[in-house]
Structures are given as structure tokens and as C-alpha cells.
């Protein structure tokens, strides 16, 4: 079959502009002490015709001037600083995986409710994200704070490759080998190591696992590959579950899926890298996303929203600078490609190396599929109709194969989308309060 060279060309274009990364407006440059990603927001001089980044940036800056000062300072803070500034305690823990990645976990040990023997909650962020996801909306609306105030001991991991987990005992992060991982390694090495660390540290036997998006993918992969981890889970709450992916409507993920084999040829040529989308690339997606002229346009310059879309009604504009300052937090190209493979195959399976590679790694022409019946921990699935990534059909298929589904909960708001689970104005009302009520049953 002849490869579709347009994707190779798109890739060459990305390579060409590799250093011209636009991640966020200048206002959101983070502190020097941080292992920062991307290095610094630079705006390409070659403006893409599809989407006017310069205009979006100017609009955002003008809009930011109308916001309270705190909204801007919080954009540049680290997670621990952000938590402290709101009067909550924060601990930072380092965990080294068996394959050498050094990961950072943030912990809010308690909130307003300091009861004894607090149960542990493990809050796993998704693709391109970090522990910041759970606190960006502040104490009233951020799930991390809400859980702490409800009397839980809250642990917020950061997986390999994101801005807080970019070190390795041997590898340098400029090595291709550092980026040679997908979410299957995150589930296998990172999540297992962090769960074990948390249980040891807190002297507990079980924890609540709450995940968003990829944070649920890694849970399902882990529990099917290492079923003994089911025993460590009190209950799992999947916010926007993602295992089967063939009904994803995200334009960016579908573009990636359509060119998946060409992307891989390209990867073999240039090596495996961090995913750093440039303006040319995002411009192609931005014109699909951002037909409307509003300050929300600035979100079209952000890879997370290019993947997941956004929802005007649930988006709190005051949070824009903070969101832009903390996401995207970094991931490998391979993580995205692996989702592309799931879209194409319709299966929930390990990384596909191609026929000969699969024979070498799996002793089979096909990669193994994850057996979801081995996921025996109690699972609650929260999904919504307007989710570009976590499609209802795919969620229901997943639910049909898991061994211990407690409930499937369709979010009441028909417009609720993939990132609203994190930053949505009504996320607390639609999702978080509901999760806490159900946690009390376990
Ligand atoms: C590979 O698969 C074949 C056929 O299923 C089997 O006979 C053989 O023992 C396998 N080899 C290894 C090393 O697992
Ligand atoms: C928007 O976010 C700001 C900053 O966290 C908060 O003060 C405000 O109450 C939020 N607005 C809504 C409608 O949630």
C-alpha cells in the first residue's frame, strides 16, 4: 500500500519549525527553577495562514489586563506554591521507577477537615497534563482541595515526561531513549511505583484511584497486566474513561490516527521525541477549532485544547492564564501515536511494532490486547455526550467488559466536554460532589 505522503510532509514541516514552539502567551512563562517544558514560548515569525496566532496572543494579553493580578501570578507558580498560596499544606515526594524515571508527587495531606486516619486518594492526571489539573480552579472548585476538605489524604502524581517528572537516573532527557515510552509504560512502571510508594508512606492497604482520560487508560492497562494491583484499589473513578478509542471525534487525534504508519516511519528516521507541536501544526487544527472570534481563541494555540476542544459555557475565563501557564505539561509522541493505533484498530491493546517487531517483542504478529475482565476493582464511569475524546459508544463497550462496574454516570449537562472534568465551572456540582458521595460506600 502506498503511504500517504502528506503526513510525511506535515512531519517535515514540524521538524523544520521544531524550535518555534508556541505553548502559551509570554505572560505565563514559569519560574527558572522548574524543569520547564517547552523551554520557552517562542512565536514563529512565519505566520500560518490557517490561524492567526499573533492576533490570538494580542487579544489574550489585552484580556489578561482586565483580570485580577492573582490570575496572572498564579500562572507562573509551581503546584506546591499554588497550593500554599491558598493556605493548604503541600508535600513534594520523589519516586524512582524500576526503569529509572524520577517522578514527582504532590500531596495535600489534609484540608479543613483534619480527622485522624484519613483515607488516601490518588488523583491521576491525563495526557499533556500534570498534578496542576486538580488545583487550577482554586479551593472552591478544584478537586484536590475539595477532597482534602472532605477529609481525604490527597496524592497527585506526575507521570514520566511531564514538567515535574523529567529526570532519569541514567538517561538524559535529550536522549531519544528517554522519550521511548507510551502510556503502557506509564501504567506498568509509573503508576505501580507511585501506588506502592503512597501505600507504604501512609501505611494503608488500599486507596481510591481517581483518573481523568489517560489517567484511566493507564489504570485499565495496569490492572489487566498486573491484576494484583486490583487488591490495592478501594474503588476506581474514571472521569472521561479512555480505553476503546475508535469513536473519538477529536480532529487532532484523528489526523494523527490517519497518518499513524507514516508518523512511525518518520519516528524511525528521526528518533522518538517529545511531543512539541509547533504553530504550523496547531494552525492546521486551529482553523477547525477556532472559527469564532473571541478571547477563547487563545486556547486554540494550546495542544491540550486542540485535542480535547472546549466548551464556552463551562470555561471560566479568569482561569485562562493559569491553564495556559500549566498546560501542556509535556508528553511523548509515542503516547499520542499509541492512541492513534487504538483509534485504527478498535482494540485496547499494547503498542503495535508492526509484524516483525511484534514477533520479536510479543512472539506474535499482533500486539496483545488488554484483558479488561481482569480489572476486578469496583469501577465508576463518568462520561458525557459532548466529549471529543471519550465517546459514549466506546465507554459503554469498556463497561461491558470490565468485571466490576458499579455504575455508569452520564453527566447531566449535554455540552460538558473532556476538559470540563478539570476546569469546568460546574464540575463540582456535576461530578466531584457525586464522586465523594459514592466514595463513602467503600
Ligand atoms: C512463540 O509462539 C509459539 C507458537 O505459539 C510457541 O510454540 C513458542 O513456544 C513461543 N515462544 C516463546 C519464546 O514464547
Ligand atoms: C472563576 O475563577 C476565579 C478564580 O479562581 C474564581 O474566583 C471565580 O469564582 C470563578 N468563576 C466561576 C463562575 O466559577
Image: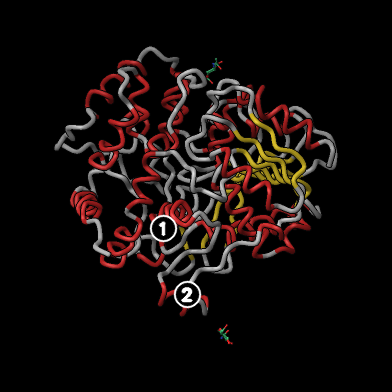
- Residue assigned mark 1: 334
Q: Nearer the viewer, residue 141 or 377?
A: 377
- Secondary structure type for disc 1: helix
Residue 153 at what x, y percent from top left?
Answer: 73, 41
Q: To which quarter of the image does residue 221 belong?
A: bottom right
Q: Nearer the viewer, residue 232 or 252?
A: 252
Q: Nearer the viewer, residue 53 or 100?
A: 53
**Which corner quadrant holds the C terminus?**
top right
Residue 157 at what x, y percent from top left?
Answer: 59, 48
Judge: label 2 CB < 8 Å from ligand 1: no
Q: Is residue 13 left or right of residue 417?
A: left
Q: Is residue 178 visible?
A: yes
Judge: label 1 CB < 8 Å from ligand 1: no
Q: Is residue 196 above or below residue 414?
A: below
Q: Which mark is residue 260?
A: none
Please tell me which of labels 1 and 2 falls first in the chain: 1
Depth check, mark 1 against mark 2: the one in front is 2
- Residue assigned mark 2: 365
Residue 302 at what x, y percent from top left?
Answer: 36, 35
Q: Is residue 296 left or right of residue 181?
A: left
Give the crowd class for mark 1: few <14, some 14-19, many >=20 residues within 10 Å.
many
Q: Residue at coordinates 31% horizontally, 63% vertically from top-left?
A: 267
Q: Nearer the viewer, residue 374 or 141?
A: 374
Residue 428 at what x, y percent from top left?
Answer: 65, 25
Give the crowd class for mark 2: few <14, some 14-19, many >=20 residues within 10 Å.
some
- Secondary structure type for disc 2: loop
Q: Residue at coordinates 43% horizontally, 32% vertically from top-left?
A: 309
Q: How far apart are labels 1 and 2 at the CA level?
A: 20 Å
Q: Is residue 91 visible?
A: no
Q: Residue at coordinates 25% horizontally, 39% vertically from top-left?
A: 279
Amino acid at each position: 500500500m502506498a503511504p500517504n505522503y502528506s503526513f510525511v510532509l506535515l512531519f517535515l514541516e514540524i521538524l523544520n519549525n521544531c524550535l518555534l514552539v508556541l505553548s502559551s502567551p509570554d505572560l505565563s512563562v514559569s519560574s527558572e527553577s522548574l524543569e520547564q517544558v517547552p523551554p520557552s514560548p517562542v512565536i514563529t515569525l512565519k505566520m500560518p495562514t490557517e490561524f492567526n496566532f499573533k492576533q490570538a496572543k494580542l487579544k489574550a494579553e489585552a484580556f489578561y489586563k482586565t483580570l485580577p493580578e492573582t490570575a496572572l501570578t498564579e500562572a507562573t507558580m509551581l503546584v506546591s506554591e499554588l497550593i500554599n498560596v491558598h493556605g493548604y499544606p503541600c508535600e513534594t515526594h520523589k519516586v524512582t521507577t524500576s526503569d529509572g524515571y524520577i517522578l514527582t508527587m504532590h500531596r495535600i495531606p489534609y484540608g479543613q477537615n483534619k480527622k485522624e486516619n484519613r483515607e488516601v486518594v490518588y488523583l491521576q492526571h491525563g495526557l499533556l497534563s500534570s498534578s496542576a489539573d486538580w488545583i487550577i480552579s482554586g479551593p472552591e472548585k478544584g478537586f484536590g482541595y475539595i477532597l482534602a476538605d472532605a477529609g481525604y489524604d490527597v496524592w497527585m502524581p506526575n507521570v514520566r515526561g511531564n514538567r515535574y517528572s523529567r529526570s532519569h537516573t541514567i538517561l538524559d532527557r535529550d536522549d531519544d531513549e528517554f522519550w521511548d515510552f507510551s502510556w503502557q509504560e506509564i501504567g506498568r512502571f509509573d503508576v505501580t511505583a507511585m501506588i506502592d510508594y503512597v501505600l507504604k508512606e501512609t501505611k494503608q492497604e488500599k486507596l481510591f484511584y481517581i483518573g481523568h482520560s489517560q489517567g484511566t487508560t493507564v489504570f485499565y492497562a495496569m490492572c489487566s497486566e498486573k491484576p494484583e494491583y486490583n487488591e490495592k484499589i478501594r474503588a476506581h473513578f474514571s472521569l472521561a474513561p479512555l480505553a476503546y478509542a475508535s469513536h473519538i471525534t477529536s480532529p487532532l487525534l484523528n489526523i494523527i490516527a490517519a497518518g499513524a504508519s507514516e508518523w512511525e516511519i518518520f519516528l524511525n528516521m528521526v528518533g522518538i521525541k517529545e511531543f512539541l507541536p509547533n504553530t504550523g501544526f496547531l494552525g492546521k487544527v486551529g482553523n477547525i477549532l477556532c472559527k469564532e472570534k473571541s478571547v477563547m481563541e487563545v486556547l486554540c494555540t494550546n495542544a491540550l485544547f486542540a485535542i480535547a476542544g472546549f466548551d464556552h459555557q463551562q470555561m471560566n475565563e479568569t482561569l485562562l492564564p493559569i491553564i495556559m501557564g500549566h498546560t501542556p505539561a509535556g508528553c511523548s509522541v509515542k503516547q499520542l501515536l499509541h492512541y492513534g493505533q487504538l483509534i485504527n484498530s478498535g482494540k485496547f491493546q499494547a503498542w503495535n511494532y508492526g509484524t516483525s517487531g511484534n514477533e520479536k517483542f510479543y512472539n506474535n504478529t499482533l500486539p496483545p490486547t488488554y484483558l479488561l475482565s481482569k480489572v476486578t476493582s469496583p469501577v465508576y464511569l463518568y462520561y458525557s455526550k459532548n466529549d471529543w475524546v471519550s465517546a459514549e459508544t466506546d465507554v459503554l463497550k469498556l463497561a461491558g467488559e470490565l468485571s466490576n462496574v458499579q455504575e455508569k454516570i452520564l453527566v447531566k449537562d449535554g455540552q460538558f466536554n473532556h476538559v470540563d472534568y478539570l476546569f469546568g465551572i460546574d464540575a463540582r456540582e456535576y461530578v466531584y460532589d457525586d464522586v465523594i458521595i459514592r466514595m463513602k460506600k467503600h
